[in-house]
Structures are given as structure tokens and as C-alpha cells.
Amino acid sequence: EVQLLESGGGLVQPGGSLKLSCAASGFSFDMHAMAWVRQAPGKGLQWVSAIHAGGAITYYADSVQGRFAISRDNSENTFYLQMNNLRAEDTALYYCAKVLGTSNWVFDSWGQGALVTVSS
Amino acid sequence: EIVLSQSPATLSLSPGERATLSCRASHSVRSHLAWYQQKPGQAPRLLIHDASNRATGVPARFSGSGSGTDFTLTISSLEPEDFAVYYCQQRTDWPLTFGGGTKVEIK
């Protein structure tokens, strides 16, 4: 059974940093691209960032480009989202998601989410 | 950026009725469209990928159709557990984008 477990969420002041982790199990982690998708309170889904299986190729939404960095450690079956210079509008529930196939770019498994609140 | 517009915003139906949800793309996404279901307090669940392919374990009452810019998710006969919010998502171009969602509520 695929399991994705996020950690690292919390309350941070504007301009601060936070690092989310997503621990994966139940599938061949090093064969799948992975992604982060967020959902602001009461709002819809927004894709944030994605990373290929090998980790060399990454993608970012314009709203986080230059502030967020996605990475992965295939030896630990874990991937990360380093978030810097956080803004109030980054407040959301951050889901980690597994990509269908190697790089189909749809998400067939999701974690339960890590809440990030940016407020002074 | 490819913008996905979902309609209607809210669909009020009774159990047993047929639900038809629409997703329209600002540019062609070929058949690279997926549908997700999200219930309150839960993560989204993949229903359909590549316009018409049901994901593993998804009941046959869910079906998807369309290509290019116009897509439809049909639920043939609503079950009580189907009342939820549904999102479409395109994977043709970066950034990946989602539609704003359609809420299917009990009438």
C-alpha cells in the first residue's frame, strides 16, 4: 500500500523559512516523479513544484520560483520542499503527491497534508 | 499558462441522478486531462486520467470524455458517497494547472 507522510509544517513569520518532508513507502520511490500541491483554506488546488525520479529535473510554479526548492533523497525514500521568504499568501495545506507512472504528471496517491501558516 | 474553467460551480442533485461536470481549457490539452474527487477533510483522489481512463479502484459509474479543450466527467447514478468537490487538471504544459472545482451537493 502506498503511503505518503508529510512533516515539517507549522507557524512561521513572513520572511521566514520552513522545510517540509514527505516520507514515502509501498512503491519503488526511485522510479516515480513526485510533487507538492497546496490548498489555501477554503480554496482550490494549486500545483507548487515537481521533481523527476532521478532528482535532476525540477519544476516550479511562478508564484514560488526562486523562493522554494524541491529535492529528494532516493536512499531515504523521502523528498522535500524548502520554503524561504514565506509570504502570507503561502498559507495553505501542502500535500505531497506521487506521480502516476514515471512522469505522467497526474497524481495517483496523496499524503494527508502539512499545514503551513505564515503570519506575524 | 493553460487556464481550466469548470462549470457549474455547484451542482445540486439527488442520489440516483446523473451528474455531468464540465471542464474547459484555454488551449488544447489534447487528452491530457485528469479528474479528482475531494471530500471535506480529505486529500484529493484521482478518478480519471488521460481524459477517459479510470484510475485503479474507481467505480464504473464514473466516466470521462473529451479532447482538446472540452471535457466532461459523468457520474451515471449518484451514490451518497459521491457528494464532494471535483477538480480537473491538465498535464500538457507547465505549469500544471487545476480547475476551480465543481461542488456536487445533495438537493
Image (cartoon, coloured by chain):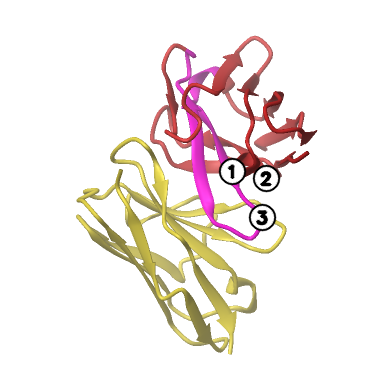
Chain colours: A red, B yellow
Q: Earlier in the sequence, mark 2 or mark 1?
A: 1
Corner quadrant of residue A116: top right
Q: Nearer the viewer, residue B51 or A39?
A: A39
Q: Is residue A48 magenta?
A: yes
Corner quadrant of residue B57: bottom right
**Circle 2 Cα neighbour tier, 10 Å, few/some/many (<14 / 14–19 / ≥20):** many
Q: Nearer the viewer, residue B10 or A42?
A: A42
Residue type at tag 3: Pro
Residue A6 screen position, x and y as percent:
72, 33
Residue bearing mark 2:
A93
- Name the image quarter holding the C terminus of chain B: bottom right
Residue B63 screen position, x and y as percent:
39, 66
Q: Is residue B88 left or right of residue B86?
A: left
Whether labels 1 and 3 belong to a single chain: the reply is yes
Contact check, label 3 and label 2, Cβ < 8 Å: yes
Residue A21 screen position, x and y as percent:
70, 25
Give the alpha-carbon distance from disc 2 to disc 1, as whole Å: 5 Å
Residue bearing mark 3:
A41
Q: Is residue A7 left or right of residue A75?
A: right
Residue bearing mark 1:
A38
Q: Residue at 34% of width from left, 56% of height from top? A: B4
In this picture, which residue range is highlighted in magenta? A30-55
Tag 2 subunit = A
